[in-house]
Image (tube, rainbow, N blue to C red):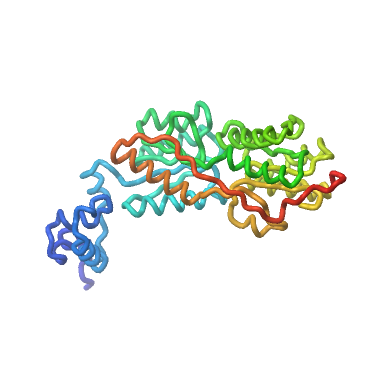
Amino acid sequence: MSSPPSRPVALRDVAAEAGVHPSTASRALNPAMRYLVADPVAERVQEVAARLGYRPNAVALSLRTGRTRLIGALVPGIANPVFAPILAGAAEALSSVGYALMVADPGDDPGRAAEFVEQLAARSVDGLLLATASLHDDPALAACRARQIPAVLVNRGSEGIPSVVADDRGGMGLAAEHLLGLGHRRIGHVAGPAQLSTGLLRAEGFERALRAHGVEAEPSLRVVTAAYTREEGDRAAAVLIARNPDMTALACANDLLALGAYDACRRAGLRIPEEISVTGHNDMPMVDLIEPPLTTVRIPHGEMGAQAARLLLGLIGHGEEAGAVVLPSALVVRGSTAVPRSDGR
């Protein structure tokens, strides 16, 4: 006859083995309360809990505190390499204080994003990280307000909503300054979606840099994309190449757009960078491995996710007021840019 299954290890078992009161054990095992326990005691309790295989009862904890210690995150394309380090940074910051991250991918559908907010709210998440927000009348943000769910935007900005973003104006300005410094004057702009803060601000940064050098931002040298995808980059770059035979460079608002620009340039028989220079924005993984390696603007994505998580925890735990955190960008010069040929090609 098989022996009956043993009961799960309880908090009182950990406390008894460690020689402390259960309330002390509870504080020692709660990252948010650990500072109330002396380090040697906390370390002993944690060692005992690990040895006994203790797992906190999430339901009991939720009933006691009114919180599930779950955070939701919405990203517009989980396969997009930009979002992996953002989510990793957020998850690490959250797990260090006993929170877990749930990720949903509504793509570029605002209505679907709002539906996911409702679904995550039904699971009683304590707050949301949103990488999906549009500049105006965003349904997901409206759903957060209606549900009174604390939310922080990440890699997106919207007026009046706490956010952690990169210096999009300054970053795109760095790319434009680099091309202008090499001697380019006929620079095509593969712009990001106008309904997103990143698209709007990067376009402003690009045009501001041109004006500072006395170069006109001609409408014929700009195509606004509908999404940050390789296909949209290909389409936009092909239009610019056909429209501007004297163009010597392409400044792209995103690395995926730049990869599409590579496709369009190769199809048109233009060598990069000998006949046309290309820049991107984000420095997503492996753009240093393409041929030629992409000159791009580096954004601290991991830090962005971590800071957004910490900002959200401040809202949840203490109702702290928060505004916009802007992280610096940096230009990474690689092999996709060079001085223009004297004949324009």
Percent x, y for residue 327? 49, 44
Closer-to-camera residue (167/240): 167
Q: Residue at x 48, y 51 (%)?
A: 302
Q: Residue at x 21, y 66 (%)?
A: 44
Residue 80 visible from this viewpoint: no
Closer-to-camera residue (122/11): 11
Left or right, residue 301 beside residue 31 = right
Q: Residue at x 50, y 26 (%)?
A: 137
The correct choice, above or below, for 97 with respect to 125 in the image is below
The correct choice, above or below, for 13 with respect to 35 in the image is below
Q: How many marks?
A: 0
Percent x, y for residue 171? 59, 43
Which image quadrant: the N terminus?
bottom left
The correct choice, above or below, for 52 with respect to 11 in the image is below
Considering every residue shown, the one lying at the far top of the view is: 137
Closer-to-camera residue (61/275): 275
Percent x, y for residue 193? 62, 35
Name which quarter of the figure residue 194 lies in: top right
Name which quarter of the figure residue 309 lies in: top left
Percent x, y for residue 110? 52, 33
Q: Residue at x 46, y 33 (%)?
A: 140
Left or right, residue 331 beside residue 129 = right
Left or right, residue 337 beside residue 35 = right
Considering every residue shown, the one lying at the far bottom of the view is: 1
Residue 101 visible from this viewpoint: yes
